[in-house]
Image (cartoon, rainbow, N blue to C red):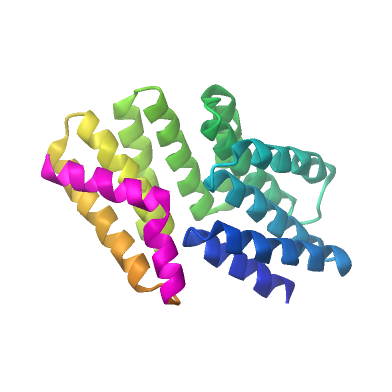
Amino acid sequence: MGRIVNSLGWLHQEFGDFRGALEFNREATELGRRHQIGNIEISAQLDIGGGLVRRGEAGPALAVFEEMIGRVEKGLGSHRWRWDMRVSVGVAEALLALDRGDEALAWIDRAMATARSTGSAKYLGKCHALRGEHSILGGRWDDAVTELAQALAIGRKIQYPTLTWQAGHLLARAQAEAHRPDEAVVTARLALDTIDAVAARAPDLALRKTFLEWPRVVVAREDLDRVIRA
């Protein structure tokens, strides 16, 4: 039951329903604590932090992740490497959102090293995307193109649409700024097609509406349309 509830929280988060995701993940956290199932409790707490970042509450999210660092470093059984990687990504996301990019980079590199050594493709893709975002914040457009192209390639290879459209959105922007308009248009169309496909496959109309009204999706569509029209 705890795994199912936690998975529902993850699903709602992928569609931008952070309120619903928070409710599911709080329930999963309580189930994990009550029944002493550490994997469920830790996973749900990390998802709570991720949801807070994505709905614009980076400060509280960072506090959640910082509390988790100590628990992870003390050891959480055979899954310690996975929790360390997820905590590192979460801290990096929160720091980037707080405009503390230089601090975020060390956490990205920490997560990337674990992702590479364990073959964790999804998190390797996320790390490339975060490095690309860091490069964008510094106006290093060619570096951003390199990192985000790798993130997009991984997202497509493992068929993970969230990584695909988010990396594609940022890559199209970076390609446009790096004076690669033809590449930017191709990437923009791919990202838009992926967004439309995610919306079409939403499990119900409410989540489809939430997804299409998610500010990140709205901004992405506006940016991508602008790239195509340029």
Magenta-drawn stretch contains 223: yes
- Compared to residue 35, the image places residue 218 above or below, namely above
- Compared to residue 38, the image places residue 107 above or below, namely above
Q: Magenta span: helix, strand or loop, mainly?
A: helix
Q: Residue at coordinates 56% horizontally, 57% vertically from top-left?
A: 18
Q: Is residue 114 left or right of residue 166?
A: right
Residue 4, image x and y in percent? 66, 74
Q: Is residue 177 left or right of residue 84?
A: left
Nearer-the-camera pick, 216 or 103? 216
Residue 31, image x and y in percent? 80, 68
Residue 192, image x and y in percent? 26, 56
- Compared to residue 195, the image places residue 84 above or below, namely above
Nearer-the-camera pick, 111 or 6? 6
Observer able to see residue 33 = yes
Observer able to see residue 158 = no
Q: Residue at coordinates 15% horizontally, 46% vertically from top-left?
A: 228
Magenta-drawn stretch contains 178: no
Nearer-the-camera pick, 206 or 54? 206
Quadrant for the C terminus, please. top left
Q: Residue at coordinates 61% horizontally, 47% vertically from top-left?
A: 52
Question: What are the residue bounds of the magenta stretch?
Answer: 205-230
Residue 109's quadrant in the figure?
top right
